[in-house]
Image: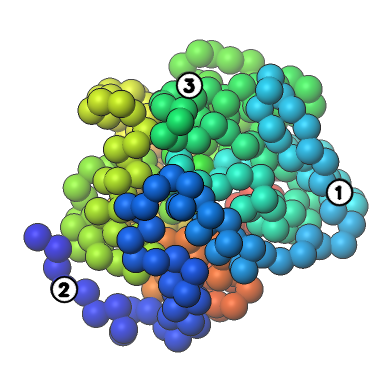
Amino acid sequence: MAESVNYESLIDQDVWAFIRRVENFYPADTAQRSTAEQREIYTNMCKAFSYARPAGIVAEDGLIDSIPVRRYTAANPDNHAHIIFAHGGGFVVGDLDSHDDVCAELCNTTGLGVTAVDYRLAPEHKHPAAFDDCLAVTIYEAQRLGSPVLLCGDSAGGTLCASVAHHLRDSQSNVAVAGQVLIYPALGGGETESYLTHANAPMLTSKEMEIYSGVRTDGPPPTNDPSFAPLADTNFSDLPKTVVLSAECDPLCDDGRLYCDAINNAGGQAQWRCEKGLVHSYLRARHTSVKAKASFKAMTDALSNLAR
């Protein structure tokens, strides 16, 4: 049973202002509405929180094996590595525009090039369609550029990035992955302490997680499949250096801790940051919340450090 959590004391006023603003666009029953309605609601919300690209950032749309991508280049590019970015949205919503400002700011702050992936969405395209698209783009860009890649994504995008990292290790690919930065990812931890304690957290509930997970497949979710849930893997050795940023007030918080523990216990290098007082999707509060701004800086610092 979910414990009673006093979010009024855990969450500061800046974050509450962000939550209330999101709620103006996002009805409580959004996850239970039709796919078309969910996407319309999400698109309108993203537009309301969108910021202009920083000056000097060049963005160009393209296709990789019929997969839409958007490539970002900084005015003074850093070619040590290239970021592959996978957006969040429960595998159901999101596109190149929903995270355009995030990708542009990642590019501008780090100087690293960014390729955003417009992977296929559920329920029209079941697992492993989204994974296949992210994997294909990662391999293509690494070979095209001849440089290491950094995998970065939020929420569902974080899931996909970790899944790609596991696959590239197991396939003994010649793709050099310099690291991965995962932002409040869903990694398949199951009914963890945070999943129960924060079952009714603002911005994402455990029930909503079950709904989003259920549309990825036609039947029961696969077991022992790291391309679906990275924590289902039995081998966490030889994975790239990893940084996971989890929101404290989020059912998925413990997924990041468990994943980093598994990597470190297998002899790898992983850092878990539990961002106190933050909620799922706080990335969109990076300009209005002191805590979210600090976490965004931690993301960009991690990407810059991993690139070198």
Dot placed on the residue nearer the N-terminal end, 2 or 1: 2
The answer to whether residue 176 shows anywhere in this view is no
Residue 245, horizontal then vertical, whole percent: 46, 55
Horizontal placement of 279 versus 94: left or right?
A: left
Residue at the spot 32% in from the left edge and 40% down from the top edge: 213
Cα distance, mark 3 to mark 2? Answer: 39 Å
On-image quarter of the C terminus: top right
Residue at the spot 27% in from the left edge and 46% down from the top edge: 210
Q: Secondary structure at mark 3?
A: helix
Q: Secondary structure at mark 2?
A: loop
Cα distance, mark 2 to mark 1? Answer: 47 Å
Residue tagged by mark 2?
A: 4
Horizontal placement of 55 versus 95: left or right?
A: right
Dot placed on the residue nearer the N-terminal end, 3 or 2: 2
Residue 6, horizontal then vertical, whole percent: 24, 80
On-image quarter of the N terminus: bottom left
Residue 89, horizontal then vertical, whole percent: 48, 48
- In the picture, the disc for residue 235 is none
Q: Residues within 10 Å of mark 2 (few under 14, many from 20)?
A: few
Residue tagged by mark 1?
A: 58
